[in-house]
Amino acid sequence: MPSTEGSVVKDGDRISSADIVGALTRASFTYADGATQVFTPDGRTVYTEKGTPSAGEWKVDDDGRFQSFWPPSVYSTYDLSWIAGANGEAIGVRFSDPKRAATFDGRYTPGLG
């Protein structure tokens, strides 16, 4: 999070490399299709879709971008930006994959996972 959990963010602002760990590990995520995802500070992640979990890994690369790895060979790089509520509170993270022109919105789901 920018400085503290209660900091105000602007919808669509890129998440700085220094804030990626806090943004991803603040709470679990729920996506539009009902899938959920949990990120841990040690670089592990579990994505659960229709009750089936998949374990992967994540990191911040040397360029300050988010990367994920899903064994055995799926690597992806995303630009991360804030999803902000009406009062500027961070309510989630937008994952944008410029190579595939795909965007995924993960909303914070406190207490999940």
Image (cartoon, rainbow, N blue to C red):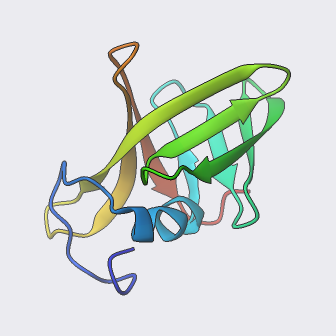
Location of residue 91 in the rendering, given as x and y in whole percent from the top left corner: 35, 59
Q: Quadrant of residue 35?
A: top right
Up the image or down, 105 lies above or below 62; here it is above
Q: Say which residue appears at 39% left-offset and 53% top-offset.
A: 92
- The residue positioned 69% from the left and 67% from the top of the image is 41
Q: How many marks?
A: 0
Q: Nearer the viewer, residue 84 or 65?
A: 65
User: Could you tell me which quadrant the N terminus lies in?
Assistant: bottom left
Which residue ends up furthest to the front in the rendered image?
62
Q: At which x and y percent is residue 36?
A: 63, 40
Residue 87 vertical position relative to residue 63 in the rendered view, above or below: below
In the rendered view, does 44 fall on the left or right side of 109? Answer: right
Q: Nearer the viewer, residue 90 or 23?
A: 23
In the displayed orientation, state which residue is furthest to the top: 100
Could you say where residue 42 lies in the image, as x and y percent from the top left?
Answer: 76, 64
Residue 103 position within the rendered picture, expressed as x and y whole percent measured from the top left? 36, 26
In the rendered structure, the answer to whether residue 89 lies left or right of residue 104 reads left
Q: Is residue 52 above or below residue 47?
A: above
Left or right relative to 63: residue 85: left
Judging depth in this view, the residue of 23 and 75 nearest the camera is: 75
Screen quadrant of the C terminus: bottom right
| Residue 8 horizontal side relative to residue 45, left or right | left
